[in-house]
Image (cartoon, rainbow, N blue to C red):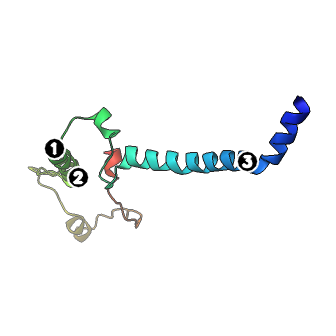
Amino acid sequence: MERMLWANAMKARWVIGGGFGLSFVQQMYWNQQLRDVEVFGADGNGGSMLKIVTDLTDEEMARLKYVRRLYWHWRGSRKMYDGRDQISDQELSDRGIELPQEEYIEYVKRPPHDKYL
């Protein structure tokens, strides 16, 4: 009996291997597509996984993102030395007072991604 099963399995090895191979390829393709649709959505604006986190509408989410970006870039209406009579560095140097020069570091600071705000 075992010899007959083994002989039949060897004759059908391409069918069995093809079934396993196609199921493997289908699982890899289908799981990736399902993940992308669940996370990013079919149109790229967020899938159903976001509904677990929030019940906000698209307009409310856009308003929240706008406020977060605005808050990040807003420097405030009050500056550090408002209301104080400050002597400028130029005036101090004109009077003979030497000030140490700060080291100049050039960099471009970009705002963080919305995910981190």
Q: Position of residue 56 (x, y in %)?
A: 19, 38
Give the residue at mark 2: 69
Q: Position of residue 88 (x, y in %)?
A: 20, 63
Callout 3 touching callout 1 (CB < 8 Å): no
Viewer-closest of 71 and 22:
22
The residue shown at (34%, 49%) is 41
Q: Secondary structure at mark 1?
A: helix
Alpha-carbon neighbours of circle 2 within 10 Å: few (<14), some, or many (≥20)? some
In front: label 3 or label 1: 3
Q: CA distance from mark 2 to mark 3?
A: 54 Å
Mark 3: amino acid: Gly
Give the residue at mark 3: 17
As displayed, is residue 92 above or below residue 9? below
Callout 2 touching callout 3 (CB < 8 Å): no
**Among all residues in the image, which is located at the extreme left?**
83
**Which label number is shown at residue 60?**
1
Mark 1: amino acid: Glu
In the image, is 11 to the left or to the right of 62?
right
Alpha-carbon neighbours of circle 1 within 10 Å: few (<14), some, or many (≥20)? few
Which of the 4 image quarters holds residue 97?
bottom left
In front: label 2 or label 3: 3
As displayed, is residue 97 above or below residue 2? below
Sequence-earlier tag: 2 or 3? 3
